Amino acid sequence: MSQEEVFLGTTQTNRNESDVNRDRSRSRLGLVVTGVVGGSLVALYAVTAPFVAPALRKICLPFVPATTAQVENVLRVLRTRTGSLVDIGSGDGRIVIAAAKQGFRASGFELNPWLVWYSRYKAWREGVRHSTSFYISDLWKVSFAQYSNVVIFGVPQMMDKLELKLANELPSTAKVVACRFPFPTWVPEHTAGEGIDTVWVYDAKTFKSDLHGEMTRTVSQQEDATDSNT
């Protein structure tokens, strides 16, 4: 075999090995890219799922951070109050933390676990970890009977149902503060702020009395209907 043939054979072998190595590198790169993309999609789902899932519910309580004015208005209407406070749909915890700084034993209920974990971290950073509590829970599965002050950032679709729940559960000494949207049938004791920063204050003694009166009228009407049929 001539030297030229040997040289050409060696060159061809080197080219083949180079092509194999290039293909292997491309394959490894493809696996890495696939892993990164797949991992990113999983991480994205993990982060966004808690935000999206509540929106799929029949009644959704979306996370819209309270404005500074709203927080100030809530604290102002509760300035003469003490004891326990709960923020229903506590979001990033700003109402709970602000209330704890004013001396309340404050709790927040939030369906989104990421917001609850962030709230706990924020409470620790603000120095009110021992006077605050945050729970991952659906508000419809919780009893609020132990709270004397209730704050709610609701949506119109849920307020009538929440009226009945709170009227049945809260003590007569409780106060309820509604932000952004008022309750549909309750008569507020007073209001504070204006526009989107308006808060409505309700006395449990009043709306519980109204509920009792409504139930009494319903029973009376049912008894009258029964007497008419006999």
Image (cartoon, rainbow, N blue to C red):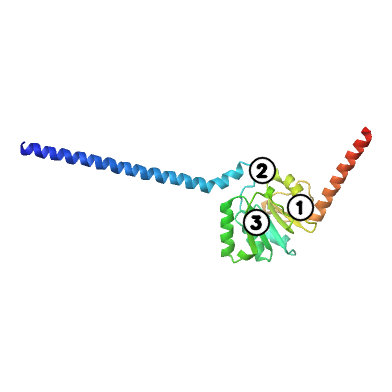
Tell me, for residue 169, which label it has, or none. 1
Inter-mark Cα distance, 3 to 1: 17 Å
Is 140 left or right of 5, judged from the image as shown? right
Q: Position of residue 52 (x, y in %)?
A: 57, 44
Helix, strand or loop at label 3? It is strand
Residue 101 position by quadrant: bottom right
The first of marks 2 and 3 along the sequence is 2
Mark 2 lies on residue:
59
The amino acid sitting under disc 3 is: Gly
Residue 46 or residue 154, whichever sits in front: 46
Q: Which residue is mark 3?
A: 108
Q: Are marks 2 and 3 in contact (CB under 8 Å)?
A: no
In the image, residue 89 lies at what x, y percent? 65, 52
- Quadrant for the C terminus, please: top right
Callout 1 secondary element: helix
The picture quadrant where one finds residue 106 is bottom right
Q: From this viewpoint, is residue 68 visible?
A: no
- As drawn, the label of residue 36 is none
Callout 2 environment at 10 Å: few (<14), some (14 to 19), or many (20+)? few
